[in-house]
Image (tube, rainbow, N blue to C red):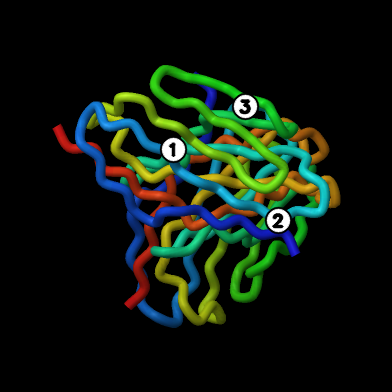
Amino acid sequence: EDQVTQSPEALRLQEGESSSLNCSYTVSGLRGLFWYRQDPGKGPEFLFTLYSAGEEKEKERLKATLTKKESFLHITAPKPEDSATYLCAVQGVASNTGKLIFGQGTTLQVKP
Amino acid sequence: DGGITQSPKYLFRKEGQNVTLSCEQNLNHDAMYWYRQDPGQGLRLIYYSQIVNDFQKGDIAEGYSVSREKKESFPLTVTSAQKNPTAFYLCASSIDRQSNSPLHFGNGTRLTVT
């Protein structure tokens, strides 16, 4: 069964304090791994798609990396506006529906 | 601007009443999805549709129904048979079900049933 586990559940950082969020996954053939950002009361906003181990993608202070078993979302010198819940999701090759399996999310709080 | 519009943002209903949540997209996407989000849990798939006049049950379809009469619209009805309907409901779309393109989400409807 496809499964996604994110850690930690919550993370508090001081502004400028870099850190990483983890997404561990089990899937029978990875078609894609997706990162989303979700602000309170809003829908998830797409950040990155990673397709194969070794791939990396960057956007401003965020960098996503992928191995065969996990993905990391690295946040460099975060600012208070980076505070949000970050969701990880996978799509397996067995899925012919476009369905994504989501983790529980990591809630990040960045204090000024 | 293209996007997904969900309405209403907040919805309150009495137990035993059916309620319909609206989802409209102008992205010209073929596939549409309904997810449910509860605190401390990942998003769970309720129903999905790959093409007009066709839809399939997701992982937690019991107590829900959908229709897909137009490409742009995918309304979700929460029936009185749904045991725990209070939740945040998210509608999403993607170009098509077979590609690994990302899902685009609306801003959700928070349903409270008392």
Q: Are marks 3 and 2 on the same chain?
A: no
SS assignment at label 2: strand
SS assignment at label 1: strand
Where residue A40 sits: x, y (%)? 31, 46
Q: Identify residue for label 3.
A: B27
Label 1 CA crowd tier, 10 Å (few <14, some 14–19, many 20+): many
- Residue B5 visible from this viewpoint: no
The numbered mark 2 sits on a residue in which chain?
A
Q: Is residue B3 left or right of residue A108?
A: right
Tag 3: residue type?
A: Leu
Q: Are marks 1 and 2 on the same chain?
A: yes
Q: Quadrant of residue B55?
A: bottom right
> Marks 1 and 3, Cα distance to the nearest angstrom?
20 Å
Nearest the viewer among B56 and A95 is: A95
Tag 1: residue type?
A: Arg
Q: Quadrant of the N terminus of chain A?
A: bottom right
Disc 3 to disc 2: CB gap under 8 Å:
no
The mark found on residue A15 in the picture is none
Tag 2: residue type?
A: Thr
Badge 1 or badge 2: first in the primary sequence: 2
Q: Identify residue for label 2.
A: A26
Label 3 CA crowd tier, 10 Å (few <14, some 14–19, many 20+): some
Q: Identify residue for label 1.
A: A37
Disc 1 to disc 3: CB gap under 8 Å:
no
